[in-house]
Image: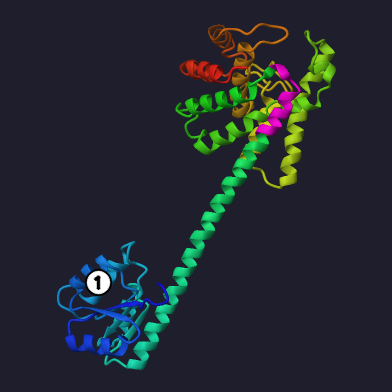
Amino acid sequence: MGKEEKAIVLAVDDTVTNIEVVKGVLSGEYLVQAALNGETALKIIEKKKPDLILLDIMMPGLDGYDVCRILKTSEHTKDIPIIFLTAKSQEEDETKGLSLGAVDYIIKPISPPILKARVKTHLLLKSFRDQLARQNEILEEKIQDRTKQLNNLQDVTIVAMGALAESRDPETGNHIRRTQAYVKTLAKALAKTPKYQAVLQPDIITAMYKSAPLHDIGKVGISDDILFKPGRLTEEEFEEMKKHTVYGRDAIAAAERALGVADNFLIFAKEIAYSHQEKWDGSGYPLGLSGEDIPLSARIMALSDVYDALISKRVYKPAFSHEKAKNIICEGRGSHFEPLLVDTFLTIAEDFKNIANQHKD
């Protein structure tokens, strides 16, 4: 309400004399509306909500209790303060009225000072509640805006960290963007299978998608002479290269400790960085994990990473076609990759192809 607006008080009573008494007491400070029965009161309230209702109990048709019950069960009207103004003076009557949600109970005959004081008090309380509700709405909006900003900052930071790793391996080009999209696409398809329907909820898929760019973050710890070697690595060099999984896990774990929270995306980032080189049959590294001992996030990343490596040019190989990459992944079913992941991949292989074309090097 603006400063010049009067609060609206609706008086509901089947006796005209009682309405006139209320108007005489309150009309100097408030805009007093009147209804001679419950049905009329509800129609008035539907058109424009009053700020407070003075409600008689004993009326023909809908009595005061019925009107109160209807108003308090409606989302639109439940916040309107109701004061019963009645000749019913028994304690059980007052108890019933208050239990229905009324804020006060005044017994007739009306005492003008008491009526004024009670109406003023409850309008003031309603004003405070409304202000608090508005402040809470503003606070909630600010929290949502801040959360959005933090999420955006988180996304930018993750991509920047992934780009740092990518800069240490320039042949990968758009590898980060492609593998991130592959992970999301494969996870969403897996979520439709009975085995993973309950596990791969939307928030989990989002966290995996966000963490995917960090899968090779550990490469920042590998020396240039190994990382940029134009030919195949020696056995000793390959053993050193394998350590990028450990370096990546440790770097993310350090960030996690600094934050003091175990956020989903950091948990998945650690899993992916550490275990995306594991293989379903246990022949991978760094731990030689097999089967479902390999975290699901890492299994999804492994297939995505291998597909992209196959379709990309490397110093030791040309870029393979989509069909050849698909066939090689099929050959790895049950050895390199979980069978269900390969089966699911085959249903969405064209999506992988489209992602690869969209983010060509």
Q: 354 above or below 263? A: above
Q: 200 above or below 330? A: below
Q: Amino acid at mark 1?
A: Val
What residue is disc 1 on? 67
Q: Is residue 223 left or right of residue 284?
A: right
Q: Residue at x 18, y 70 (%)?
A: 39
In the picture as drawn, the residue positioned furthest to the left comes out as 60
Q: Residue at x 54, y 33 (%)?
A: 205
Q: Position of residue 56 (x, y in %)?
A: 24, 81
Looking at the rendered structure, the number of numbered marks drawn on it comes to: 1
- The magenta segment is 159-171
Q: Quadrant of the N terminus?
A: bottom left
Q: Nearer the viewer, residue 62 or 154?
A: 154
Q: Position of residue 111 (x, y in %)?
A: 32, 93
Occupied quadrant, residue 42? bottom left
Occupied quadrant, residue 41? bottom left
Residue 334, magenta (yes or no): no
Q: Position of residue 185 (x, y in %)?
A: 51, 25
